[in-house]
Image (cartoon, rainbow, N blue to C red):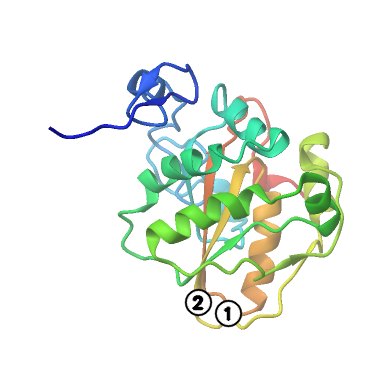
Amino acid sequence: MPFFSEKNCALCGTASVQDLCIPCRDDLPQLPEYRCPVCLWPVPTAEICGTCLNNPPAFTRTAAAVRYAFPVDALIHSLKYGANLALAPILAQLLLEQIQTMQNKPDWVIPMPLHPIRLRERGFNQAMEIGRFVAKRMNIPLLPDGCRRIKHTQPQTELPWKERQKNIRKAFDCTIDLQGKHIAVIDDVMTTGATLNELAGVLRKQGATEISNWVIARTLPEKNQIDPFSIE
């Protein structure tokens, strides 16, 4: 007789053989069926959106597990600000379901770096915790010190969308040779994409030819809000 280890669902607390019970897993906020493959913005036919065509970001594509909404936002908040590190592999597994069958695997995985001041305050980098799990399962080398955050910026969530690109400008440094490499950047949430785009620009300067964003959740504002990459 097979033995099944009983757990408790991370969301509802009921007994489950998985970290998320089937009803909770099925009820997670999903991304739109048709979305831009570069930035995941909703589009009518799953083609590259007009904004990415007219003003291409430095990254090549984006993959996300879910939409950033309740209860995913609560899980990510608990990981980042509650130091609930047990949630990192649970969130990482959601992402793996989207990327583990991809044909064009990256050469290296780089977690979104935190500035040393922020790292000391928090005690860990949530992107690193997620990245460790993903890189191991995907059998891709993780570069934990591949890039550095050299500018201590105000948290992006505290700023209006129009200020986020300015806030993150020249925030990263990278000295390793990425010539001809495909890099996957791991982060927890993509909102405007400004931070991921800034880091991708630095990776491009080091020779990276492809940059994939791998994020747990993508924020998708209401339709009457501004498109992320149209911000000057």
| Mark 1 → mark 2, Cα distance in angstroms | 5 Å
Give the vertical position of 72 relative to 111 (above or below): above
Q: Residue at x 62, y 56 (%)?
A: 55
Q: Alpha-carbon neighbours of circle 2 within 10 Å: few (<14), some, or many (≥20)? A: some
Side (left or right) of 47 relative to 154: left
Q: Which of these two is toward me, 13 or 140?
A: 13
Which quarter of the figure is the N terminus placed in? top left
Type of the residue with mark 2: Lys
Residue 164: name its quadrant. Answer: top right
Q: Which residue is mark 2?
A: 181
State the image quarter where residue 207 is shown: bottom right
Disc 1 marks a residue whose amino acid type is Leu
In the image: residue 228, left or right of residue 169: left
Determine the residue positioned at 82% across, 52% down: 120
- Disc 1 secondary structure class: loop
- Tell me the quarter of the picture where residue 227 sits: top right
Question: Which numbered tag is attached to residue 178?
Answer: 1
Closer to the camera in the image, 134 or 42 = 134
Q: Residues within 10 Å of mark 1 (few under 14, many from 20)?
A: some
Q: x%, y% of residue 106?
A: 44, 67
Horizontal side of residue 4 vs 90, given as left or right: left
Residue 88 position, x and y percent, is 54, 42
Task: State the image coordinates of residue 140 (x, y, percent, origin top left).
Answer: 43, 67
Q: Estimate the x, y position of residue 232 in percent, counting from the top left.
A: 77, 50
The residue nearer to you, when weighing 98 against 41, is 98
Label 2 residue SS: loop
Q: Nearer the viewer, residue 197 or 26?
A: 26
Q: Residue at x 39, y 42 (%)?
A: 46
Q: Are marks 1 and 2 in contact (CB under 8 Å)?
A: yes
